[in-house]
Image: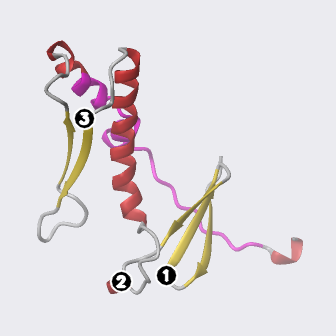
Amino acid sequence: MDLKISFPGGARVDAEYKGFLVRTDQPVKAGGNNAAPAPFDYFVASIGTCAGIYVLNFLKQRGLSTEGVRVTVTTVREPGRVGLAEIVTRVGLPASFPHKYRNAIQRAVDLCTVKQQILNPPRFTTVVHIDDMAAA
């Protein structure tokens, strides 16, 4: 399925995918209006929400409550390095959480498809072409 990109003005770049419109903008310091998350923000959010889905499914399958469960993603940058040096996902569990499931929930989170895709990256191909507007 294709993701279609549009340029609605300023530093905004939007994506249409599976019937959803994903709006992005740049921070003011990067020439945008900070009217929406930057594309990199969605990258980090996808890691956290993916971990959250795996936590949620783990809890549902065992009839456990989400009450008091937290997922936090912390990004670590190093000076002089482009991008992130480390991504830390923390799963906070309430004291009442069954001890027998603590290691299993960590293993479940590690199965997150976004994380797995990063660990096993796809081949990236860029194709630039001139559209023949006369044929349209």
**In the rendering, at what x and y percent does residue 124 appear?**
46, 53
Q: Is 53 situated above or below 48?
A: above
User: How busy is the neighbourhood of tag 1: few (under 14 within 10 Å), some, or many (20 plus)?
Assistant: some
Q: Which comes before the other along the chain, label 3 or label 1?
A: 1
Q: State the SS at label 2.
A: helix
Q: Is 98 situated above or below 94?
A: above
**In the rendering, at what x and y percent does residue 108 appear?**
30, 25
Kind of residue at badge 2: Ala
Calculate the distance from the C-alpha at mark 1 to the C-alpha at mark 2. 8 Å
Kind of residue at badge 3: Gly
- The answer to whether one can see residue 6 in this image is yes
**Side (left or right) of 48 relative to 135:** left
Q: Name the residue under label 3.
A: 68
Q: Is 114 situated above or below 75?
A: above
Calculate the distance from the C-alpha at mark 2 to the C-alpha at mark 3. 37 Å
**In the rendering, at what x and y percent does residue 84 appear?**
22, 59
- The answer to whether one can see residue 120 in this image is no
* Picture disc at residue 47: none
Q: State the SS at label 3.
A: loop
Q: Mark 2 points at which residue?
A: 30
- Residue at x 37%, y 16% (from the top left corner): 63
Which residue is at the front of the view, 1 or 31?
31
**Side (left or right) of 69 relative to 38:** left
Q: Mark 1 points at which residue?
A: 11
**In the rendering, at what x and y percent does residue 54 appear?**
37, 30
The magenta segment:
105-131
Q: Quadrant of residue 40 in the image?
A: bottom left
- Residue at x 30%, y 32% (from the top left corner): 67
